[in-house]
Every structure is written in C-alpha cells, then in structure tokens.
Image (spheres, grey):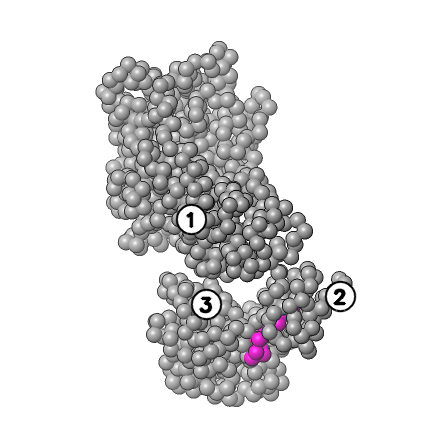
Amino acid sequence: MKGLLSDIQRFSTRDGPGIRTTVFLKGCPLRCPWCHNRETWEQRPSLLYYEKDCVLCGACAAACPAGAQRVDGKRHRFDRALCLRCGACAESCPTGALEMRGEWIEASALVERLLRDRDYYEESGGGVTFSGGEALLQLGFVKECLALLRAEKVHTCLDTSGWGGRAAELCGLVDLYLWDVKHTDAALHERLTGVPLPPILQSLREVDARGGSTRLRCPIIPTVNDTQAHIEGIAHIANNLRHVQAVDLIPYHDLGLPKASALGEEAPRFAYLTEEKRGELLGRLKALTAVPCGWL
Amino acid sequence: MDIRRFRQMIFDKDESKGYIEREAAIDAFLREGGGALPQAERYTRALIRILDSLSTPIDEGDLLVGRMVEGALPYEMEPVPAGGKSHRDNPLKVTGRSAGHQSLNYAPLLEKGLLGIWEELNKNAQTPAQKRYAVYIREIIEAVGRFAARYASAAERMGKSRAAEALRQVPLHPARDFFSAVQSVWLMELILSCAVGGRDFAYSRLDLALLPFFDPDEADDEKEILIAFLLKSNEIGGLGSELDVHMPVPCAATNIYLMLGGRGAEDALPLDLLFLEAAQQVELPQPVLALRQSAGADPAWLTACAHAAQRLHGQVSLYNDDALIPNLQALGFTPEQALSYTMSGCNRAEYVGHQSSDAFHNCAAWLLEVFYDESVTTMEELLAAFSKVARRELQRYVGNPRVDAAAELRVNLESLLLTGCVEKCRDIENGGLAIETVVHNLCGVATVADSLAAIETLVFEDKRLSLDQYRAVVRGNFEGQTALLLHIKNRLPKYGNDDERADKWAKIAGRILAEACIAQSGERIHIPSFYSLYFHQHQGAETGATPDGRLAGEPLSENQSPVYGCDREGPTALLHSVSALPQAPDRGRTAGRAGPRVL
C-alpha cells in the first residue's frame, strides 16, 4: 500500500525516546493556528516557494507546463491557481527555492529506508515515530508500516491528535502514543482546530482501556491555552488514564511561519512564553497530578 | 594541590615569550661556529650546552618539578611557518623527522633508567660508527644526569624532599615508585620538547609503563601525581593552536597523545580510569586522550570514556581496536605491534616505540589532472586514469630515506625510547627503527567523490553537457555559469547524506587511493589515511575549480568529512556516508566534522 509522505527526519530526538526517525505524513483535518507543519495539511503534494532563495534564473518558468511560474524583470510570480502540482518547477530550480512536499511511497520501501538507522535505534532506545499531519488519516498505510516495523522489532510511536476515533485499532502495533492535547475546553477546541473534542477523548480512553501507553503532548500557546483551566483539564485527563507515562508541555515557537509564507498563507504569530509563566503552569500541573510532567 | 591556581597560571601565560635560556645557549653555540659541525657532533655539543645552561625553576606549589624559564626573546620573532617548525634555525634538528611526532616507549626508562638503556646500547655497539654513537649518547646522558642533579638540589632547597629524592635516582636509574616514575617521564618529556625542541612527543602507552609502579591502594596520592603531570603537560607549548599565533618555542602547540584502554591493556583499567578522572579535574587540552574501544571492553571503561568525551571538549578521540588491530596486521605490523598500536601527532598510526613518516596528498589535484585529459571519455577511463596518477604520485615514496642517510652518523636522544634503535645501536635517522612506515594522508576525498558524482550525473546520466563542455566550464572557474553552478551545488547528490549516488563514489575513490598506497609497501609499510590536518586549506588555495562546484582557491573537503555545508540529513546519515569509505586499511578514528546545519 502506498502512503503520501511530507518528510522524513532522521536523528529526531524530541518525538519519543532515544534517537528516532520521524515520518511526517501528508494530510490533517485539524487547522490549529499555531501549527508549525502547515505543509502537511493538504492530503496531496504541496509546493513551497522560499523567496529568499530565489535567484530569478527563470528555470521554473521554462519548466512549468501551466504558466504558473513567471519571472518578470526582477520579480518572481507564482500563480497558485494555475499550479498543477506536477513538481517540474521544483525539479528545475537550482537553489531549492521551490520545493515539493508529497512523495508517494510503498510501505515496504519506506520501512527499508527507516531501517537504515536501526543501529542507532537499538543503541539509544529509540525507533520510528509516525507524525504529520495526522497520521491516522492514512490509517491503512500506517498500520502496514507498523506491522513491518514490529516484525523487525523496532520501537514505534504514533504522534496523533486522536482524530477519527480509530487510534485504538493500532494498539498492539504502536509501542507509545504521543497524544496531542490541543485544548481541554470542548467549545474552544472545536473553534480553534475545527474538529470536536469528545470523539478524541473517547478514542484516548479506548486506547487506554486496551493497554496502550501514552504520553500527553500539550502545546501551550500564549493567549490561547496558557490558562489554569487548561492545565486543570490536562491533569484531569492524565489522572483518569491508567497507562499514561508522562505529560509533556510544549512551548510555542514560530518556526512554522516561514513555511506558512512559502505556502502563500498568513499565519498568526503568538508571543513566547516567559520563564515565569512556564514555571507557574508546570507547578500547577505538578500539584494536580502524580503523572511525571515537564516542558519538552 | 591547587589546580585552579596552576590552571590560571597557564591561562595567564604571556605567549609572546620564549625559552630564553635555551635560545641564549644556542646563540652562543652558533657564534662559536658550532653550526658547521657534523650533525652527531653538533647535536651532542648543542644539547649538552643547553642542558648545562638551563636553570632549575620550581614553583612553590609544584609537586613534580621541571619547568622552563620564559622571557622576551632578544630578536624579532620570525613568522612561524605551517607545520609548527621552530621560529629559527635549530642546530639540533636535521631532517625534521626527528623533531617530535613519535610514540615514545617510556617502559625501558622506568625499568632500567637511561644508564641501563645505554649499557644495552653499548653492548650492541660493534662497528666504529656504532661505538662513536654510543659515546655521544653517553655524553648526553651524563648532561641529563647533571641537569637532574641540579634540579634535585633546587628541590631540596625548596623543601621538596620527595622530588629531590626522586631526581637523585631518575632518569638515570630505574624508578623506585609511582612518583619517581612520573617524575622521570616528565623530566625526559621536558628535555625532549623544550631543550632538544620538538612537538608531539607522544606519551603513547604511558599507562602500561607506569603499571608496575601503580598501587590501587594509593590511588588518592597517585591521582594527585597524575594531576600534577597533566598540568605540567600544559605548561609547555602554550595554548595557541597550529592555526593560531603561538609561542615562539620549538614545542609550540604541541599535541601529546596519550593512548589508554583497549585490548591487551585490561590490567591497566584502574590506572586508566584514574587518568580519566585526573584529566577531568585538570580540564586542559593536553595530553590528547586517545581512548581505545572494542566490543568486549569493560562497561566501566566505555562509560568513563563517554563521560570524558562529553566533558573534555575536543581533547578526547576514540579508536576502534576491532578495526585497527586486524587492519594494521594486514598492512604488515606484527601481531604484537598491532596490539600495542598507538597514535602520535598528526594522527599517525604507530606502535609503542615507533615513529611513522607521513605525507599529505592533494587528491583533488590528481582528479583534475585526469579530468582534463581529453583522451578520457568514460567514467571507467576516468577511474583507471585516476588510479594510475595516484600510483605514480605515491611511488615517489618507495624506498627508505632514513636508511639512505646512513652514510652520516646521526644522533637523536629520543632514539633511546624507540624500539629497534638500542638493539641495532643505530639512531632513528640511520634506520634504527624495527620497521619503517609512512602514513599517506589522502586529502579531499569528499571533493573527489562529489566531483565524480557530478560528472556522472551531468555528463552521462542527464546529458546536460558533454565532458568537453564540462571541462571548459570548470577550467573557467564557472564564470558566467551561475545557474549550472547552483544546480551542481544544490541539486546534485553529495557525500554526507547517506545517498548511494554520491557515497558509492566515495567508496570507489577511497578504495582506489587506499589500494594505491598499499601497493607501494615493500621496504616500508605504506598506510593510507584520509586525515587532512589543515592541508585541505593550503591545498585548496592552490587548486583550480573542481567539478563538484568548488571554486578555485576554496578549501578541499576536510578529513573524511563531507564538503563544507553539504551534509544536510543529520548525523546518522553523515555517519552512514563516512562508513562507506574503506575503513579497512585506514585508522578507526573518524575525523568527521558535522556541518552547522546538522548541529
């Protein structure tokens, strides 16, 4: 079975234990405003254009069969409406200013690539993490990859928003769920991400009931969810799970903004959390739960 | 021991000053016409003069004694040429081959003392030349003895009876205990580095030499002694690097390799661990800690090495016994020599009591020669021609210059600490070593690999331009070819990313170069290596543009590392690529450098 990849990141050290390879899959039904992987939202290839790397050579214009790429004097123009997403422009671009994201790949071929770093997984207690996008959007593909990796005795993580209600189907194949908790207020969750919270929590309970280990991963975004109420909500979720290993608070960063710009999109910029605020939120969380927790 | 104070003294040192007593002695010697004497006579007389003129400074906090008086030199300092040579003519230096860069065997010194070694040397003196050699060496040893005796008296006056007692015994006589053993080694190191004058006199397996004197029950005292010893190793040579402004002394920017751990050294584990503990308290650049690893190593050792590597920024390098021992044997080392392998300055694979010659080759220039050969029309022909050029260039090193120089008697004090010289009663420069080796440092291998990948892709796969057109573009330093240059730099496969399209060329080029080296073995053992020190800078400055998009004058790739900026897939991918190079005949150390994007 084929899946649609956005990227493969080797030597990943923040997406689960040890040295890992993280597979970013295309497609996500959520629209979190703070997302740093917007290029994974569409479940089809995406074309990014980094203006700072463009040398106005015109190779893209010559290669584009649809006239979407043009160089007029000292300006590059990209008409996204005309773009066929064929990748011819990116292929011809000498600097990488144009970059296609979206590679169709067979599960077996992907696993073969992932096993290149097997020695590092074994030595460091690491493995492979499926992320996105929302990896569960390509459930069949992910399931096949996980089975192949299990046969190779490679530790696996699934980084998921929990969307779709089918996460529990992977119990027995996934060693550790990295479960993103975007907001614990149902109304705010739906308003911010575009999807309802209750099915996600139901799915999390199902995973827990089947013995699936989880780490809760909670992006903390100033003015969005850096509140006592949200922290209490996180603690409440953690305290009602039997197989939760830890809670990771993830501070907001703005590394996704250049990618948003490269996609021709506007993305809001949030403030950084202060050290004081971090300490306050973590202190509150620790006071509310015995589950190990900290900032990632 | 006040480590902090000694560290501060090292940091505060005025590195514009030199060893004025030594320089004054040499000036006087040269003024009297000593420079015109034959080497053996010149070396002996000059060294004796220096040793007899050195004063015996001792700091009130010194545990071990032996330091040099430093002061402003009475003449303008000349620029120090690349390679760390002395700032002025050194009458003790003849060909450069004896000026340090050796893996000294300190075991005989501690077991027999200099006089004991000399007795053996003298017994082996049969010919008139050998007998003259023994006489010169004896005179030098007596000067060393006088220097040690004066230091003993100075130590006594300072109330340092332990050092005084030791120096009445060593280095002329065998060491009696751990303290006198370390004191003996330090005085010899000081004499060789600062009085004879040379860099990188490696301690090699000093741990094994000290082992008979080591008592685990006295570990606290012994650690203190090792701390003093490690501090002393940083008092000479200054803290400037070879690429930096450094002290106007002959041992400037010395890199003293100390090899610890490994197969055959299991009994030394407690002492080796103590060395690492002491080094982590001293936290200074010397000595270079070369730590041997193997699959069966004690976990305590592996853990200690990991901690040391983490804490001692850049001071630690790791060597793989499981690769190196069989590889060195395959190259011609005996099993005993291979098992006792060690390293000296410039990362040369040696064994205890040995010195290898070395050479740094510009492999990118070799590739360019065949790239511009218009009779070459295919990749196969290109590789065959590359191999031919490599063999032609390396053939220049066949033969043994040291043996060729045997007509004139040579004297070098360090020969007493090198295997073969005492047995043969011949100086290192007269072919005294048990075997002769030469390490060929093959610089720019990644530049070659990326160039081959570019030629294959552009000319033979994409057919974007003909080989002749490509030659013209490269010869023109990519002038007016910005788009093509960017395409080559950004879009073609590059070694360092676990990309078989480029890594296969590193493998092929590496194998061609390694085999070309090994093919020269006969009178000497030829050892291939991809170490480049800083030669990739100098050689790059003299090399025209290369097909990988490197412009004329830019540095070549460094060591086994990818071309600067070309490793973009992270450290694991980088290490996969490096492992594509032929490690078999090479040393186990990977002198890889991760690019900033990885870090």
Q: Which residues are magenta?
A: A38-49
From what the image shows, is residue A236 above or below residue A250? below
Residue density around tag 1, few if under 14, some if 14–19, many if 20 or more, within 10 Å: many
Amino acid type assigned to the residue bearing label 2 in the image: Asp
The one nearer the camera, B263 or B400, is B400
**C-alpha separation, residue under disc 2 versus residue under disc 1:** 47 Å
Amino acid type assigned to the residue bearing label 1 in the image: Gly
Let me know if marks 2 and 3 both belong to one chain. Answer: yes
Residue at left offset 47%, top offset 74%: A105
Residue at left offset 40%, top offset 62%: A120
The one nearer the camera, B79 or A225, is B79
Magenta span includes A104: no
The one nearer the camera, B2 or B321, is B321
Badge 1 element: helix
What chain is tagged by disc 3? A
What chain is tagged by disc 1? B
Badge 3 element: strand
**C-alpha separation, residue under disc 2 versus residue under disc 3:** 41 Å
Badge 2 element: strand
